[in-house]
């Protein structure tokens, strides 16, 4: 992104975080056939809190792999390659939620998404506590337990030895965590870049759209 008007990014970030929530449903969730379940769960959470409503659902049939670094700017180059291996091999879906300005929609989307399995407690990893308060709480989705077996062993071992690292194959499994939502403006812009001009107009007010175009030159 090129240099833009001073303070524009901060103003845009503050406004869009209250006006638009984004959930990026990844290929593993689509392949498992749980896209509608995830969207319905998220929509219910948003509407129950009275902060907004589901605005759009978009099928992303061909995810440009060169955009992976914008979606996950904190990944290492090796991580980009592993994530791209599966995100660019199938369909993804983006769901957008229009906020009424009363809450931080980005923060709410992250609550709906839930914590990474790496951040679960040992008791949670052992299945002794119910994780029914987020999308990632569905993991391992019934029927996929065997696929997660090795990664689960490593995740549990890391609780006493944080220096342990995933093998590439374990990381590939770990990355299949159903859903992504942006943590900051950079990731929000990366996800907006996946939408068409028509879809952007469906989700951004004229003022926000103008700011987005200026920031994203």
Image (cartoon, rainbow, N blue to C red):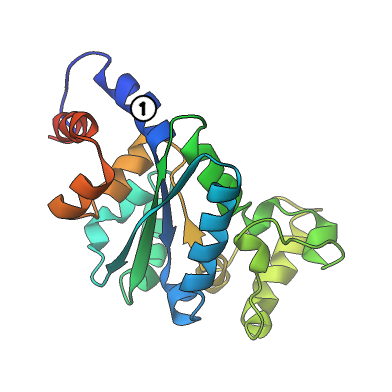
Dot 1 alpha-carbon crowd within 10 angstroms: few under 14, some 14 to 19, many 20 or more: some
Badge 1 marks a residue whose secondary structure is helix
- Foreground of the two, 34 or 118: 34
**Image quadrant assignment for residue 217:** top left
Q: Give coordinates of residue 24: x percent, y percent.
A: 41, 58
Q: Position of residue 157 (x, y in %)?
A: 77, 61
Rendering quarter of residue 108: top right
- Residue 46 seen by the camera: yes
Q: Relative to residue 103, is residue 183 depicted above or below?
A: below
Q: Can the viewer see residue 175 in this picture?
A: no
Q: Which residue is mark 1?
A: 15
| 46 up-or-down from 14: above or below | below
Q: Is residue 163 above or below residue 105?
A: below
In the displayed structure image, the side of residue 189 where residue 96 appears, left or right: right
Which residue corresponds to the image point at 29% horizontal and 41% vertical from the top-left?
A: 189
Q: Is residue 163 left or right of residue 106?
A: right
On the image, which quarter does residue 128 sit in?
bottom right
Along the line of sight, which residue is nearer the eye, 209 or 91? Answer: 209
Residue 75 point in image, percent of width and height = 43, 49
Asked if residue 164 lies left or right of residue 193, the reply is right
Picture residue at 62% right of the left edge, 54% below the top: 116
């Amino acid at each position: 992104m090129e240099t833009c008007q001073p303070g524009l990014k901060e103003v845009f970030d503050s406004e869009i975080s209250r006006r638009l929530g984004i959930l990026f449903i990844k290929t593993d969730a689509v392949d498992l056939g749980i896209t509608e379940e995830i969207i319905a769960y998220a929509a219910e959470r948003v509407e129950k809190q009275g902060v907004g409503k589901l605005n759009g659902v978009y099928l992303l049939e061909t995810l440009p792999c060169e955009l992976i670094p914008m979606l996950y700017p904190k990944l290492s180059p090796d991580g980009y390659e592993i994530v791209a291996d599966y995100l660019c091999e199938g369909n993804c879906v983006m769901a957008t939620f229009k906020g009424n300005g009363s809450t931080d929609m980005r923060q709410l989307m992250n609550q709906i998404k839930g914590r990474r399995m790496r951040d679960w407690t040992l008791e949670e990893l052992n299945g002794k506590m119910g994780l029914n308060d987020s999308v990632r709480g569905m993991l391992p989705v019934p029927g996929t337990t065997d696929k997660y077996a090795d990664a689960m062993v490593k995740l549990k071992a890391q609780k006493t030895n944080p220096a342990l690292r995933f093998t590439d194959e374990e990381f590939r499994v770990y990355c299949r965590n159903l859903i992504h939502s942006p943590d900051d403006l950079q990731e929000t812009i990366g996800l907006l870049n996946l939408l068409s001009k028509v879809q952007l107009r469906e989700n951004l007010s004229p003022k926000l759209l103008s700011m987005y175009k200026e920031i994203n030159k």
